[in-house]
Image (cartoon, helix red, strand yellow):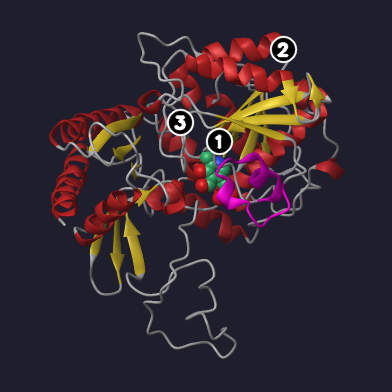
């Protein structure tokens, strides 16, 4: 067990649908334009989910759905996993779901230790953001990077999503998401992700000279705040909202060595990838040791919010309490869920099952890509995968409209999947709970295949 420094402190939602599908009565104060008081965030109307078990959801009308996207990619252990549920209920029974972060609590320390134990490389410190989400975990890592390096700028991918706080909105790519928000003062340079299916430099694996890493080096040279002033490169190891772009195996190691040579930190945003690539962290899949890792979503298994920044060295403990405390950072409830989740994932056969189901998905999705010309490629790895829909086999342009039709048809087949780029992308995400079995993986693919046939016919 590695030494743990004491803890210090402590969905990607769908676009709101413009049309109302609700016949629900309005609350007295609901704005006239919206059908329910929550409609700013959530579409109203069926299906109204009322219960979940494993990879399945049930709705109020008796419908049953296979969830191919694990909620918002956060239900890693499936709905209602008994061990995690029990751990959470036990905490509630103590009357202490929360203890002020002015005090230590054995549950918080135990959860931090559990995360540190399974973290890659020299990660030895867990900065909990408790019952918050991925945005605060990433922002916490940014704060540490600023304070540790004294440098001011960041570099991130153009298609990235790192969160919805102002800092992480500025850090994220996808400019349409910050059109009306005053995030411009945040010094970030956005660079292309290594998308080998649509190489921006027109290269193939045979002719590749890692021009994409060269472009990142140029961004490091010329930070918005001045020369040699980049604190960190922040990247999702496999793009989540940005359509599953999956760097080739040696890519992250190569980038890390070039960052090291310049004293620039590497922050992995593993908010979505946690557990999905056959081991706890995608860093392990890529064989790279990031300086910091932000985690959330799947770390608490059943949808209890939980988040943390994992830090590589004690030197990164540079922030004072006034610079990092959050009310819910040391949530005992979240930490109980995290500790139980890690325990389940460390159990016999857990990753072996995920690996086998991932192989079923890979095999079946590859077959779909061969069979259907409009499926351009399969992206991702393991249980972080999906299909890139294109306008034609020769023109590899993404087809967002087709991706939507496929997801809508999946819904009719009782399968929940999602598209990318907040509805603007051509990628159909397949990211089921990590506990999905081989038969369920086949079932998922049967339904997706039926949906593809109908969507392509219509
Ligand atoms: C990779 C990644 N990072 C950060 C976030 C932000 O997490 P949250 O919405 O929990 O704040 C998300 C959310 O989808 C994400 O996918």
Quadrant (top left, top right, bottom left, bottom right) of the C terminus = bottom left
**Number of other residues with Cα within 10 Å of mark 3, as a class: few under 14, some 14 to 19, many 20 or more:** many
Mark 3 residue element: loop
Residue span colored magenta? 165-183
Q: CA distance from mark 2 to mark 1?
A: 22 Å
Kindly indicate the quadrant of the structure image that contains residue 154: top right
Picture disc at residue 378? none
Label 3 sits on residue? 238
Mark 2 residue element: helix
* Residue at 77% over, 43% down: 185
Horizontally, residue 322 falls left or right of residue 387, namely right
Mark 1 residue element: loop
Label 1 sits on residue? 158
Q: Is mark 2 within 8 Å of ligand 1?
A: no
Quadrant (top left, top right, bottom left, bottom right) of the N terminus = top right
* Residue at 58% over, 46% down: 175
């Amino acid at each position: 067990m590695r030494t743990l420094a004491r803890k210090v402190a402590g969905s990607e939602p769908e676009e709101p649908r413009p049309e109302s599908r609700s016949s629900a009565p309005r609350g007295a104060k609901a704005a006239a334009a919206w059908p329910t008081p929550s409609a700013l965030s959530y579409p109203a109307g069926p299906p109204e989910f009322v219960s979940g078990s494993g990879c399945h959801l049930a709705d109020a009308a008796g419908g049953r759905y296979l969830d191919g996207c694990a909620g918002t990619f956060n239900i890693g252990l499936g709905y209602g996993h008994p061990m995690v549920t029990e751990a959470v209920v036990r905490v509630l029974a103590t009357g202490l779901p929360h203890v002020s972060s002015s005090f230590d609590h054995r549950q918080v320390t135990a959860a931090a230790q559990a995360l540190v134990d399974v973290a890659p490389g020299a990660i030895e410190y867990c900065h909990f953001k408790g019952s918050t989400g991925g945005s605060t975990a990433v922002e916490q890592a940014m704060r540490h990077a600023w304070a540790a390096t004294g440098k001011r700028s960041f570099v991130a991918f153009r298609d990235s999503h790192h969160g919805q706080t102002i800092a992480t909105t500025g850090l994220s790519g996808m400019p349409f998401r910050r059109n009306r928000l005053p995030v411009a003062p945040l010094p970030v340079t956005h660079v292309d992700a290594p998308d080998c299916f649509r190489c921006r430099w027109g290269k193939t694996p045979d002719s590749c000279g890692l021009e994409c890493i060269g472009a990142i080096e140029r961004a490091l040279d010329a930070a918005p705040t001045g020369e040699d002033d980049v604190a960190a490169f922040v990247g999702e190891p496999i793009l989540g909202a940005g359509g599953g772009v999956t760097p080739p195996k040696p890519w992250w190691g190569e980038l890390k060595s070039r960052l090291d040579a310049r004293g620039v930190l590497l922050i992995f945003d593993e908010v979505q990838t946690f557990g999905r690539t056959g081991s706890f962290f995608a860093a392990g899949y890529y064989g790279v040791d990031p300086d910091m890792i932000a985690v959330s979503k799947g770390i608490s298994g059943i949808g209890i919010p939980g988040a943390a920044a994992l830090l590589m060295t004690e030197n990164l403990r540079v922030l004072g309490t006034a610079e990092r405390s959050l009310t819910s950072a040391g949530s005992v409830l979240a930490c109980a869920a995290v500790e139980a989740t890690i325990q389940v994932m460390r159990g016999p056969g857990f990753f072996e099952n995920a690996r086998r189901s991932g192989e079923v998905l890979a095999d079946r999705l590859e077959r779909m890509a061969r069979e259907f010309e409009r499926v351009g490629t399969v992206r991702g790895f393991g249980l972080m995968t999906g299909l890139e829909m294109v306008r034609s086999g020769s023109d590899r342009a993404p087809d967002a409209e087709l991706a939507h039709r496929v997801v809508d048809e999946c819904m009719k087949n009782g399968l929940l999947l999602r598209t990318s780029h907040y509805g603007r992308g051509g990628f159909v995400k397949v990211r089921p709970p990590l506990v999905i079995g081989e038969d369920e993986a086949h079932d998922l693919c049967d339904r997706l295949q039926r949906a593809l046939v109908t969507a392509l016919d219509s």
